[in-house]
Amino acid sequence: MNKLKPQALKKGDTIALISPASLPRDLTRIDKAALYFENKGYKVKIGKNTTKLYGYLAGTDSERLSDLNDAFSDNSVKAIICLRGGYGAGRLINLINFDLIKDNPKIFTGYSDITTLQMAFLSKTGMISFAGPMAAVDLYENPDPYTETLFWDLITGAKEITEVPLPEGVKLGGNRQGSSSGELIGGNLALFTSLLGSPYLPKPEGKILFFEDVSEPPYRIDRMLNSLLLSGYFEKCNGVIIGQFTDGETNNPYNPTLSQEEVFSHYLSKIKCPVITNFPHGHVKNIATLPFGLEVTIDSNNCKVFFNERAVTI
């Protein structure tokens, strides 16, 4: 499938804020996020259903789908930024009109539960999307400078990024298997593996895989990595990037467990292609925006990641 790049965002363009999964915990963050983007020189449209609540979802499936469709069909909207993740985006996939998205490629940003939409968009339309900061989580007030700078540089095309910069004090690890290149796919490990066997997950051949997660104990990470191993993803891919896996360790003496490090060591030892570890993306303060579908190179000897092309058309 041909690669589909969105247009670069320009000052004065309109950004749509939507909630395809769960509702922001603090609704005041929606207006704060809108003000943040307006102060940056952009117009903002807030989805009409963003404050709806249906159990753990930000409104019913039809309401959340309506906001997604409105954002993609509105010619004035140039970027769509999710307010938060949570849960529920995957319920929309078999309802999405992918022709609408293919005919109207736009900057689309989020992470965590938003992984399901990003992988579906990529597999069905070829559209590059951005695993990056979310409006009501990372950008509503006093955003982290590293997160903010790389995000804006990528979606505006203001600066051509080659070697991915790192936050101060962060060092990547590598398995010293050399360098490799490929299109980047992945996202949240739990959400990515939930799509295994469906037509909404990109094939692993020639790809660079990226994964992060939060609040997953070692045995669950073990199970998900094993699913990828059994599905041939590690055998067929060109490389792997491991991001941040936070808040998952347990210290219950009555529940013996492998450590997270032991689980990763077990599976990484079975991967014969280049691997990068400790990449700054996940449920953390410093978030490196990653364009899914973009050609990247990883150097596991020198522990570096490179973007081989722009993520937007200028």
Image (cartoon, rainbow, N blue to C red):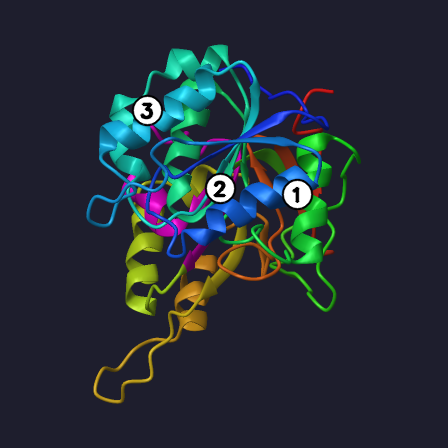
Residue shown at 70% from the left, 46% from the top: 150
Could you tell me the amino acid type at mark 2?
Gly
* Badge 1 density bin: few <14, some 14–19, many ≥20, Cα 10 Å: many
Chain-order first, disc 3 or disc 1: 3
**SS at circle 2:** strand
Q: Give the labeled residue for mark 1.
A: 151
Give yes or no for residue 201 being in the magenta stretch.
Answer: yes
* Badge 2 density bin: few <14, some 14–19, many ≥20, Cα 10 Å: many
Q: Which mark is residue 77?
A: none
Name the one closer to the observer, 206 or 166: 166
Residue shown at 32% from the left, 38% from the top: 89
Task: Tell me residue 209's x, y (percent).
Answer: 50, 43
Q: Give the labeled residue for mark 3.
A: 66
Give yes or no for residue 263 being in the magenta stretch.
Answer: no
Q: Which residues are magenta?
A: 185-213
Q: CA distance from mark 2 to mark 3?
A: 18 Å
Name the one closer to the observer, 15 or 4: 15
**SS at circle 1:** helix
Residue shown at 34% from the left, 75% from the top: 258
Q: CA distance from mark 2 to mark 1?
A: 11 Å
Q: Which mark is residue 110?
A: 2
